[in-house]
Amino acid sequence: MRCELVAVGTELLLGQVADTNSVWLAEHLAASGIDCHFHTSVGDNVDRVASVLRIALERSDAVIVSGGLGPTQDDITRHAIAAVMDVPLERDEAVLERIRALFAERDREMVPSNARQADVPRGAVVIPQTRGTAPGLICRVGDKVLYAMPGVPAELKDMATRAVLPDLMARAGTRATIVSRVVRTWGLAESTLAERVAPRVDALEAAGNPTIAFLASGIEGIKVRITAKAPTHDEAQAMVDAEDAELRALLGSVVFGVDDDTMESAVGALLEDAGLTLGLAESMTGGLVASRLVNVEGSSGWFKGSVVAYDSQVKFDVLHVPEGPVVSEKAAAAMAEGAAKVLGADVGLSVTGVAGPAEQDGMPAGTVYFGLHLDGATDVRHHRLPGDRVRVRQFATISMLDLLRRRLLDRLGPTG
Amino acid sequence: MRCELVAVGTELLLGQVADTNSVWLAEHLAASGIDCHFHTSVGDNVDRVASVLRIALERSDAVIVSGGLGPTQDDITRHAIAAVMDVPLERDEAVLERIRALFAERDREMVPSNARQADVPRGAVVIPQTRGTAPGLICRVGDKVLYAMPGVPAELKDMATRAVLPDLMARAGTRATIVSRVVRTWGLAESTLAERVAPRVDALEAAGNPTIAFLASGIEGIKVRITAKAPTHDEAQAMVDAEDAELRALLGSVVFGVDDDTMESAVGALLEDAGLTLGLAESMTGGLVASRLVNVEGSSGWFKGSVVAYDSQVKFDVLHVPEGPVVSEKAAAAMAEGAAKVLGADVGLSVTGVAGPAEQDGMPAGTVYFGLHLDGATDVRHHRLPGDRVRVRQFATISMLDLLRRRLLDRLGPTG
């Protein structure tokens, strides 16, 4: 069963609103095991909407169209569907009655244009409205089916859950359940990761179930999605678990979490397990590392704070860094030790570097030193990071947290 | 000139990522006066991408395709374009050289699959890559044009601004010049803002040029876009300037900037003009305020740093806040004074509050106190902010910066 999505609304084409409905529907179609190969957005124009619906019905078994069912003259989805079905619009008295009742309930005046929402293409089945005034539609077009729902997200989700997805599932007649998991990695280029994982890609290719796919997510590392299909949820889950284990065997500590895990939540969990508290000294990242850590639920248990020493004098005065070049191994070490001491933390983590665009003290943009003070010792790492000022900061932030993560993993020993 | 958008990536069809690129591109096409009637998303499949490109080229003059230019076997946009152009892919040595250089710069190993990114459909013009390893492409297809850019947002925005939008504008050959400006506001609800601006909306409606439109931008305030069309750039610019002045007369200090100005850049400019330096004491925001200030170019001239005192003990030890309740007027004042003193700054700005979800010391989530120390006096403001933990932090950050902005404006006096 192939179902595609069409979103109607000129505001989408102007970039004024993001199409969150399609994201939600796509996620739910995928979870229901229904293939979706195309999403289209189109403006409030009858001919263009009709042409998009015709193209969609040509290449898919079902089409879900959202938006354009309101009461104004801009709302032309009903007309476009009627054109595609080659039938007239007819006023549905039951729908009209429900619209009147909804207005009465809310003590609002019903203006004549609201009656337009009771116009239904002949032969369409109505999905009764419960939240808004626009009903949904289920329309047979030859041996294909077209669903129409209002674009208001709450109304759409309600109708999709109540009527559209169950109808689609029934038509698909599939009992298969889909389970997917995203394995999150940091530290390898996409091409290197792909080569390491190649044996699994090859092994899975023949059967086609489970599948693995790479998702680049910009600065936040590369995600590997495992998707399995099976008659029951438990069986699909077991297939995902098994593939997850295979991937981890190939990737080791490159994997920092799954699904909604973040680098900062991974670090937080390790600190919490180890019973250690963390203090930061940030120069180049300017508080970015701290601001990510405090987003982790329960961070107040292990996060003490950060000295954002953007000015060199703050490094000398507050962190007791010896006077001298501040983008250096020595300064990074002193900052990490100073952070632990000043903030009363077990672990001191520091960063100093050149965000750019200009070089500093003869160091090029992207130069960065991380300091890590733990168990009485201080290590320093030196990196050269790519990108502009914003990207250098983001890279530095995740690299620095990853450094701590790997150190905490090492500390747990090989059995950790 | 009609240009439509095609986004390539199975992750889009699975609802795993939202297509922010199309929103950004749509906004920029609209501002450039180029019509865009369709957006399509399609998965990583050569035949389906090719079919979507053919449909798009049929009904539009130009097509911008994003994504699918990476180094893995999933990345098939190059192949689909070559199929549509009916030409072979050829390895471009100059592009390959640039990829090699980028890897060398970053001290990363280049694996053979990266060379795939140097494959270019015969006859295509390369848009040199500067941020990532994938180049962009400008491809003539009959009398139409097809642009391809990587899906990584930073790379796409860079290439769109540098090459694609200027090329489109040149091809459009329209002599009417469009100038637009986004006026940024903070502090009014959309409905209140709309009422204040209503006289201008009415005044402009008849002529239809210039136009004004509201763009909700979530947490960052409401934007008002002015767009003017005229035979020359100077004339369009003058119309925009005149409308900008009308809006400011109605909105006053609610306007904090235009276009790419941010609340932090507005604050930075005022500090720089006043010759004042700033130090922060952040509790609830956890470094978020500092991390935004350091993104302002030239911030090292006026930003000293921040003490992120997440743990109460850090407030007492580092900022010399008297022991007692830390979410209080007293603590906020002591933090602002402590920040100025410890960090050696002219202005001390502080925030302490309850991000949630749980209440703290009997204070509900969203409770926040800001302290501002300047010219020998310390003011405290108390707010109750809406939303979850993340939104409360974002609201607190922008509200706190706005407090400083208004104080610095007042300091300049009515003629400032």
Image: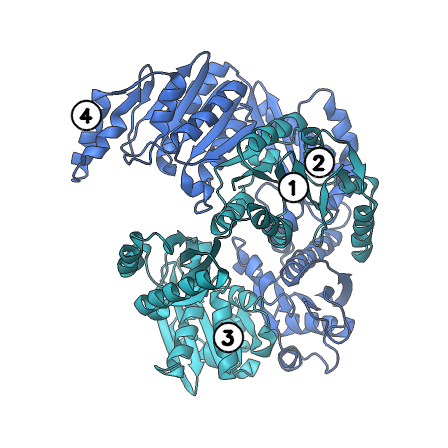
Chain colours: A blue, B cyan
Q: Earlier in the sequence, mark 1 or mark 3?
A: 1
Q: Quadrant of residue A82?
A: top left
Give the chain of mark 3.
B
Q: Nearer the viewer, mark 3 or mark 2?
A: 2
| Residue beneath disc 2 | B78
Numbered mark located on residue B148 in the image: 1
Q: CA distance from mark 3 to mark 2?
A: 45 Å
Q: Nearer the viewer, mark 1 or mark 3?
A: 1
Tell me the kind of residue under disc 3. Ala
Tell me the kind of residue under disc 4. Glu
Dot 3, crowdedness within 10 Å: few (<14), some or many (≥20)? some
Marks 1 and 4 share the same chain: no
**Percent x, y of residue A274:** 65, 55
Q: Quadrant of residue A43?
A: top left
**Does any portion of residue A169 appear in the rendered image?**
yes
The structure residue drawn at horizontal position 22% and vertical position 34%, both measured from the top left corner, is A113
Q: CA distance from mark 1 to mark 4?
A: 51 Å
Q: CA distance from mark 4 to mark 3?
A: 59 Å
Dot 2, crowdedness within 10 Å: few (<14), some or many (≥20)? many
SS class, disc 1: strand
